[in-house]
Amino acid sequence: RVAVVTGANTGLGFETARVLAERGATVVLAVRDIEKGKQAAARITQQIPGADLAVQRLDLTSLDSVRTAADELHATHPRIDLLVNNAGVMYPPRQTTRDGFELQFGVNHLGHFALTGLLLDLLLPVPGSRVVTVSSVAHRGQADIHFDDLQWERSYNRIAAYGQSKLANLMFTYELQRRLAPQGTTISVAAHPGMADTDLSRYVPAPLRLITPLIAPLITQKASMGALPTLRAATDPDVLGGQYYGPDGRREIKGHPVVATSSDLSHDETVQRRLWDVSEALTGVKFPI
């Protein structure tokens, strides 16, 4: 099987790619930095001699790069069995993508929305193919889709902006599944890692960074554990379209992967459809379904 994993050079993406390669998949490491991608591929090959790997440049901060990556994947792979939308950014100071989108919304949601739409024709003919999108427990709480200020131009709250992007990941998953259902071949599934110790936390506010070494053993788990919900969503034959996987521990922070529940808002079909329409307009990508 052919699997494309975004953000596969480190953290959850690396662990996801490593395990899929170990189990015999052809894995494409879709990464922003080609050299780091090659280094990640070398680490996997060192552990798994003979691993079937490729490195694909993909910069989710640029829709031009997303389109180029999709074109190159079409040229090299006649089919894709699994697309794992894993790459992400969390809590940065306000920045924008090359297309002017707030960075977290642009990378975490819009970049993956566009990539999925541009690659979907390679998945649709493949029975059992899947799109797995990585969300977060941060989609809960005060998270909302701020249609009146999607790009946080009036005021910026890095935590709320991250929550919006992760809520968007779930809404995309559910709306995509509803549109895929009549096709009967490809399913859309979501997962979240709980609290995993990865590079994603590099933008955590300074006060939290100071105490993180003290509390990390209590509230985080290794990336190899955090990747398990994604891997189950990607490979378990009993997974159903529209399901959401996360750790089974208290507050879904740590543990082994089980079916999780997402917020009531994430299931609002009216908001899902509106977000889909806005995402198509912003990215210029129309899905072939």
Image (tube, rainbow, N blue to C red):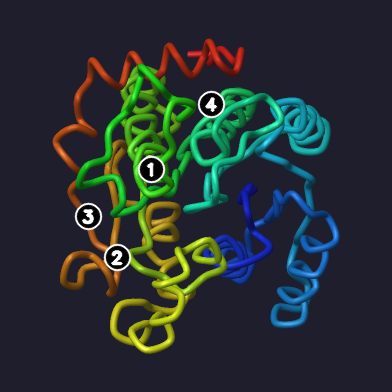
Residue 166: numbered disc: 1
Of labels 4 and 3, the one closer to you? 3
Residue 281: numbered disc: none
Picture quadrant where residue 232 is located: bottom left
Q: As displayed, is residue 23 above or below residue 259?
A: below
The residue wearing badge 4 is 124
The residue wearing badge 2 is 257
Picture quadrant where residue 33 is located: bottom right
Q: Amino acid at mark 3?
A: Val
Q: In x, y percent, where is residue 62?
A: 71, 32
Q: Amino acid at mark 4?
A: Leu
Classify mark 4: helix, strand or loop.
loop
Residue at 68 percent of width and 55 percent of height: 27
Residue at 67 percent of width and 35 percent of height: 79
Q: Disc 3 versus disc 1: distance between alpha carbons? A: 17 Å
Of pointers 3 and 1, the one earlier in the residue sequence: 1
Classify mark 2: helix, strand or loop.
strand
